[in-house]
Amino acid sequence: MDTFDYIIIGAGSAGCVLANRLTTNPKINVLLIEAGGKDTNPWIHIPGGYFKTMHNPKTDWCFKIQSDPGLGGREMNYPRGKTLGGSSSINGLLYIRGQSQDYNYWRQLGNVGWSWEDVLPYFMKSEDNQRGTNEFHGVGGPLSVEDMRVKMKVLDTFIDAAEEFGFPHQSDFNTGENEGIGYFQVTQRNGFRCSTAVGYLNPIKNRKNLKIITKAHVKNIEFENNKAVAVNYWSNNKLIKIKTNIEIILSAGSIGSPHILQASGIGPGELLKKNNVEVIKDQSAVGKNLQDHLMLRPVYKIKNLKTLNEVYHSFIKKFFTGINYFILRKGPLTMGASHLCGFIKSDEYLEAPNLQFHVSPMSTDTLGKSTLHKFPAFTPTVCNIKPTSKGKVELNGADTRVDPHITMNYLSTPDDREVAAKAIKITRKIVMESNAFKPYEPSELRPGLDITDNEQLAIEAGKFANTVFHPVSTCRMGNDDNAVVNDKLITHGLEGLRIVDASVMPHITSGNTNAPTIMIAEKAADMILADQKN
C-alpha cells in the first residue's frame, strides 16, 4: 500500500501505543514509521543495560545541547531513543505519573478532558501492575509495572534519615498525591524491560492492517491547502512518499516533532526562511517552551555501607551480579536508573512538592562518560520538578538528517537558582545531620560543605548537573495564540495533522515523563477512534 488511513511518525512511547489501539478497528489501516532500527540489541531488554544503549548511535539520537551558562558553559549529551519503543527502550524504567495538581492545572488552562479525574482511567488502562487493581491502579494492560527487585541498606538508611526531618515514607507515588520517600516502581516484566515496543507493539505487529517500517528517516510532511496529505522519508538514501486518506500523527517526541514540523514549513517564519524552508504556516510557538528537569548531583562518600562502586571495580562481584541476573532475575542488573524516589517541598508554604529525589547507590564524576568512583559513595540526585527556565528547538538547515539546535537555558531564572540551592541544602541536612547516617561517617565530595551561599551553590551544582531526560512542551496544547495543538491534539490552523507525544504537554509534569506520555497516547487513540465513529 502506498496510501494509508493513518500514518504515525515515530514508534516511541506514544507511537507504539497508537499503533496498537488504532488497529483494533480492522477497517483502519495504519503505517508506523520509525527512523531507528528494531529493538534487537539485548542491552535494551536488560533493565540495567541503559548505560549501554544511551550514547550508542545505534539506539540513541545522541543529541547535544548548546553551550549552557547554567551548566558552567558546558555542552551536554541529550539522549533520545532511536529504536522501536523510542526512549521507553533506553530510559531508566521509572514509573511516575505526576501529581493530580499537574493535570488539574492543564484543565484550568482551558484544556477540556485533561484533569486528573479525566486522565486517571487512561493511566489505569495502560497498566498491568504487580500489586493488583484498586482505585488508582489497573491490571491486564500492555505496560507491566513491577516493584524494584533490589534493595540496599544505603537506600533504606536514606529513608530513615529523611523521616528524621519530617519527610514521610511513601509506598505508592502514583495516586496523585506523592509526597514522601520510598522505592520506585519500574516498567519491567519478570526482570526484563517492558518498553512500549514490548508491551504494545510486539503482541500486535502481525495485524494485517498495520505496516511497520524501520530505518525510515522522515524528511517532511507535505501539505495541500493547509491539509497534511503525505509524508516523505528516506530509506537507504532513497526518497519515498506515502499518502494518507485521513490523518498524519506526529509522534517523534519533544525534539523530533518540532524539528519535523519546522522542516515541513510549520514554525517561526524567520527561522524557516533563514533555513530555506517554504513557510506553510508561521507558527512562532513550534519548538519554543521547551521544559525539562535538571538533576543536581551531590555526591557523598561513606564508610561501612555497600554501594555499587565496589561492585563495578571488582571482576568477581560483577561476575556474580551477572549470574544473579541471568539465573534469578535479581540484583543490580534489574534496577532502573535510580532506586529510591522522593517528593518533598523546598518550602513549607507550598501546596505540593516541588523537588524530586532520584537516589542511586553509586557515584561518578560525569554521567555517561566516566567510570564509577573507586571508593564507597552514593548520589542523592535532586531536581526542581516545577522549573521556570525554558529552552527551544530550532531547525539547523532544511535537511532533518542534520540535528537541530537544542537550547535549554537551565537555571536561567532567579527562582530556579534559589530552588536549586535549597535542594542541595535539604539533601545535605538529610545526609550530614541525621542520626541514621552518623555511624557511616558521610562526607560531601561535591559541591563541598564550604559552599553555603545560595547563588554560589547554584553555580557549583550546575557544573555537575545533568538532564533527567524529560523534554516536553515544544508543541504545547492550548487554546491561545501560542499553542500548537488544541485539546483534541489537532494542530491549530491545519487539517489532517495531529501531534501525540510529550511535546503537547501544556506544562511539565511533576516527575518522570514516560508514563504521562503513554497516557496521552491512550487518550488520543480513544479520541481518534471516536472521530471515526462520528
Image (tube, rainbow, N blue to C red):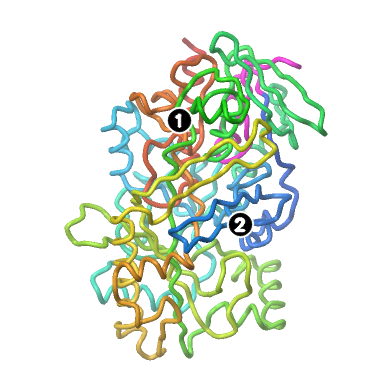
Does residue 264 lie above or below 92 as drawn? above
Taking the image as shown, residue 225 lies to the left or right of residue 422, namely right
Q: Residue at x 54, y 48 (%)?
A: 144
* Quarter residue 312 falls in: bottom right
Quarter of the image with the N terminus is top right
In the image, 118 versus 146, the foreground residue is: 118
- The answer to whether residue 21 is visible is no
Give SS at disc 1. Answer: helix
Q: Is tag 2's residue or tag 1's residue first in the polypeptide sequence?
A: 2
- The answer to whether residue 519 is visible is yes
Taking the image as shown, residue 117 lies to the left or right of residue 498, namely left
Across and down, in percent, residue 369 comes to 63, 67
In the image, 48 versus 508, the foreground residue is: 508
Give SS at disc 2. Answer: loop
Residue 28 belongs to magenta span: yes
What's the distance in space between the residues labelled 2 and 1, CA to CA? 27 Å
Does residue 388 lie above or below 485 as drawn? below
Identify residue for label 2: 190
Identify residue for label 1: 523
* Quarter residue 397 falls in: top right
Q: Residue at x 47, y 61 (%)?
A: 71
Q: Amino acid at mark 1?
A: Lys
Does residue 263 lie above or below 457 as drawn? above
Across and down, in percent, residue 114 comes to 35, 32
Does residue 504 lie above or below 190 as drawn? above
Mark 1, Cα crowd under 10 Å, few <14 / some 14-19 / many 20+, is: many
Residue 265 belongs to magenta span: no
**Residues shaded magenta:** 1-30
Q: Amino acid at mark 2?
A: Asn
Across and down, in percent, residue 390 comes to 40, 45
User: Given the current orientation, which residue lies at the most extreme left position?
Assistant: 349
